[in-house]
Image (tube, helix red, strand yellow):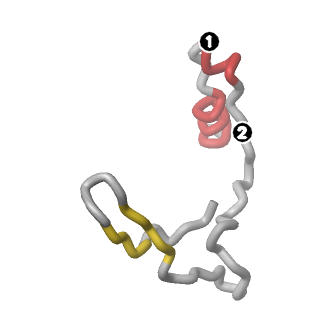
Amino acid sequence: MGSSGQPYIYSFNKDIFIAIGTKREYMPDGSPFEGIGIAPDIKVQPSLENIKKGKDVVLEEAIKVAVK
């Protein structure tokens, strides 16, 4: 989901810290971006079965699109 990737990070000690979103981001039309992101034009969902078989369905779809 959408994130500016610019949180304020505070460390209490070496094991405990918090990260707080400090910036709101919006799309050019003014709609929110934070927590929503940009929906992909082509959604490809890898399955556990494909991963177990070593099949990269995301890469395969990207190649199909690239060679069109």
> What percent of the width, then of the height, locates residue 12?
31, 66
Q: Is residue 16 above or below residue 65?
A: below
Q: Which residue is mark 2?
A: 44
- Mark 2 or mark 1: which comes first in sequence? 2
Front-most of residues 9 and 16:
16
- Mark pair 2, 1: CA separation: 17 Å
Q: Callout 2: few (<14), some (14-19), or many (20+) C-alpha neighbours within 10 Å?
A: few
Q: Callout 1: few (<14), some (14-19), or many (20+) C-alpha neighbours within 10 Å?
A: few
Front-most of residues 23 and 50:
23
Q: Secondary structure at mark 1?
A: helix
> What percent of the width, then of the height, locates residue 33?
65, 74
Q: Residue at x 74, y 48 (%)?
A: 42
Numbered label attached to residue 53: 1
Q: Quadrant of residue 7?
A: bottom left
Q: Secondary structure at mark 2?
A: loop
> What percent of the width, then of the height, locates residue 28?
65, 84
Q: Is residue 25 above or below residue 12?
A: below
Amino acid type at circle 1 is Lys
**In the rendered view, does 6 fall on the left or right side of 13?**
right
The quadrant of the rendering that contains the N terminus is bottom right
The residue positioned farthest toward the bottom in the image shown: 30
> What percent of the width, then of the height, locates residue 26?
63, 82
**In the rendered view, does 1 fall on the left or right side of 16?**
right
The residue positioned farthest toward the left in the image shown: 14
Q: Quadrant of residue 54?
A: top right
Q: Residue at x 72, y 59 (%)?
A: 39
